[in-house]
Image (cartoon, rainbow, N blue to C red):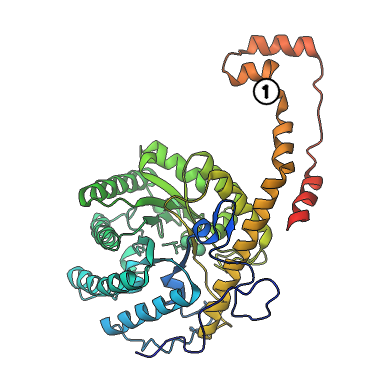
Amino acid sequence: MSEAFQDVPNIPYEGPNSRNPLAFKHYNPEETVAGKPMREHFRFSSAFWHTMRNPLADPFGVGTARMPWDDGSQSIDNARRRVVAFFEFLDKMGMDFYCFHDRDIAPEGADLAETNRNLDAVVETFQELQAERGKQLLWGTACLFAHPRYVHGAATSCSSGVYAYAAAQVKKALEVTHALNGAGYTFWGGREGYATLLNTDMKRELDHLARFLHMAVDHKKKIGFQGQFYIEPKPMEPTTHQYDSDAAACLNFLREYDLLDHFKLNIEANHVTLAGHTVQHDLTVAANAGALGSIDANRGDELIGWDTDQFPTDIYQTTQVMLVLLEMGGFRTGGLNFDAKRRRESFEPEDLFHAHIGGMDAFARGLKVADAIRADGRLAGFVRDRYASWESGIGAVVERGEADFEALEKHALAHGEPELHSGRQEMLENLINEFV
Ligand code: XLS
Ligand code: CA
Ligand code: CA
């Protein structure tokens, strides 16, 4: 079979002085930074749904993407050709991981049984190519939002029949993720939310969702799947109110329903900014709970309030991400999955390479900058000193849990007005810019 990306060679590392657009300037997979090779820090992954299946349509026009390997049919042969093209892409990019939805990789059949057979047929091709090329599935997932049956949601649908269908779909998606030795499985609540409370029993829907996830945990154990379960927060799109709106909301839900031991979070940058937070905020919320599992690496557009899923190129943002990741000691099962698409105007196959190269280089720089900031130590030192009053005296008594209001009142009466110091935000922003 001829190559899908004939005009593109394997992408080499050529260093910061290179002017070759099809080369890495900063991402050097084997180069050791902060104790391990870049490759291991990032565990870069490409999203099958964007790289192979996104036609680049928008609400005003049809897709523009040129995909010469794809004949547009719903056949298994065509589905397999896409997989072959995808592995060629991963190879040329030097990427070790990928992610998919069940329905990205194989067409729906006349009924669920036929759909499952289609999936098995295409998964065989993935198995062969994984073994041959040494690639790994970072996580699998089920598409519970595109088909009209999920119009009212899946695990939160008002219809028990739809709920059962969704469970059957997740069961199969878990089994194929297991068959592909996936490192994880993601639950993104596609249409798990609502447009109006006039027609919605929120409590009942959330109880159903929790039951659904408990059943998924049970099935995971039953089939012996060892991968990590993730929940991916998102505040809006497609529904007005998504139940998993941000990291804090997800953690609260998981705790309330006794699921926290079984799930970590997959934090997507563009979803976090849609929720009105900085990416660093949600990563920190998740990491503080010991629940930062994986990252969907992309960015939004400050001028457009949508989930634009752009490739991450902002070094300030990748630096923030890498500061949190280094502090946490790196990924265990997760990775940086480019849940990102090219702009509609970037329709040539080669653009897939430019997009991923840009994201990988931006993270390589973020890693180097974050490592230098940590080695320098001034930033961490400033934060440490800012809380110095908790190290001894009344602060230490509070932190040990040995103070009460009477003791604090006694302290306040005896010591008068407390001394305060500047937060020095501008100075710290200047410090970061010394390294960026
Ligand atoms: C959509 C989500 C989705 C999940 C996987 O906005 O990002 O792609 O990552 O279902
Ligand atoms: Ca995502
Ligand atoms: Ca998104």
- Asked whether the viewer can see residue 212, the reply is yes
Q: Is residue 258 above or below residue 350?
A: above
Residue lying at 59% horizontally and 63% vertically, measured from the top left: 299
For residue 218, side relative to residue 336 (left or right): left
Where residue 177 sits, quadrant-wise, is bottom left
**Residue 217 x, y percent position in the rendering:** 29, 47
Q: Amino acid at mark 1?
A: Glu
Quadrant in which the N terminus is drawn: bottom left
Ligand 1 placement by image quarter: bottom left
Residue lying at 78% horizontally and 44% vertically, measured from the top left: 425
Residue lying at 78% horizontally and 54% vertically, measured from the top left: 434
Quadrant in which the C terminus is drawn: bottom right
**Residue 134 x, y percent position in the rendering:** 37, 68
For residue 323, side relative to residue 60 (left or right): right
Q: How many numbered callouts? A: 1
Q: Which residue is mark 1?
A: 391
- Asked whether the viewer can see residue 64, the reply is no
Crowding around mark 1 (Cα neighbors within 10 Å: few <14, some 14 to 19, many 20+) is few
Where residue 79 sits, quadrant-wise, is bottom left
**Residue 420 x, y percent position in the rendering:** 81, 28
Q: Decide which of 242, 310 is in the foreground and name it.
A: 310
Q: Decide which of 277, 325 is in the foreground and name it.
A: 325
**Residue 360 x, y percent position in the rendering:** 57, 67
Q: Is residue 391 above or below residue 38?
A: above
